Image (spheres, helix red, strand yellow):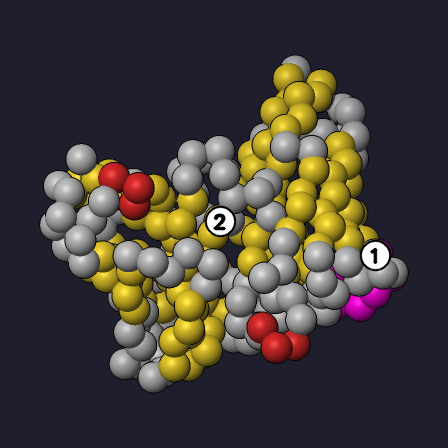
Amino acid sequence: NAGVTQTPKFRILKIGQSMTLQCTQDMNHNYMYWYRQDPGMGLKLIYYSVGAGITDKGEVPNGYNVSRSTTEDFPLRLELAAPSQTSVYFCASSSGPNTEAFFGQGTRLTVV
Amino acid sequence: GQQLNQSPQSMFIQEGEDVSMNCTSSSIFNTWLWYKQDPGEGPVLLIALYKAGELTSNGRLTAQFGITRKDSFLNISASIPSDVGIYFCAGPGKADSWGKLQFGAGTQVVVTP
């Protein structure tokens, strides 16, 4: 069972570069989320989606963009990478707002 | 926006001891979720609570949904080394923010033999 799959697992970016973090789930979940986790901190919600074609901002959306063209995929785009975006990024999905969210294994991003 | 305050920030305990942690919210929650994160992994759900006053157990873990709907508690009894990790509370908050699953800052648990 694949569940939630994130790629890549690790990435080093230079300041000003752009990249897309990929996330796909095979559970037919409507809800998908992107979080970032800084060292010793909790998870902060960047963006979320309640279904294909619908996205909304979380707590810390600045510097990021998302799209949700299919139920399965929820990519996160960084357009101009900054050192403040060095973090571990987690994608998650759930069948509804009150149900268990399943997490991917994370993408560790370093911006230098 | 709503705020989740989780305490304590960290706990250093001896194997066999009990652990308690709690979470409070600035707004009413309809669901409380407790997750555990092992190093290098994503969080995994431990217990879900759906009703005020609800007390739910999962093995040595017990969680309660506070009657004010603004707090929740997690207890771990007779801790063992594999209980090491970060424990997070989470919830979708109030009805007009459905989908915004938000997390507390976490409680780091360290168990020594």
Residue A24 falls left or right of residue B74: left
Q: Is residue B29 visible?
A: yes
Residue A25 placed where, x, y %? 36, 68
Q: What element carries label 1?
A: loop
The residue beneath circle 1 is B66
The three-letter amino acid code for the residue at tag 1 is Gly
Which picture quadrant has residue A32? bottom left
In the rendered image, which quarter contains the N terminus of chain A?
bottom left
Q: Name the residue under label 2.
A: A43
Residues shaded magenta: B49-56
Task: Give residue B103's position: percent from left, percent from top.
Answer: 57, 52
Q: Residue at x 65, y 76 (%)?
A: B95
Query: Label 1 marks which chain's residue?
Result: B
User: Mark 1 to mark 2: distance in Å?
Assistant: 23 Å
Which image quarter: residue A87? top left
Subunit that carries the residue with mark 2: A
Instruction: Bin the neighbour count of mark 1 within 10 Å (Cα to Cα): few under 14, some 14-19, many 20 and up.
Output: many
Magenta region includes residue B52: yes
Residue at (23% x, 44% y) in the render: A82
Above or below, comparing residue A52 to residue B29 in the picture: below
Q: How crowded is mark 2: few (under 14 residues within 10 Å), some or many (20 or more)?
A: many
Q: Is residue A37 above or below residue A104?
A: above
- Horizontally, is B72 left or right of A44 in the view? right
Tags 1 and 2 both on a single chain:
no
**Does A83 lie within the magenta span?**
no
Amino acid at circle 2: Leu
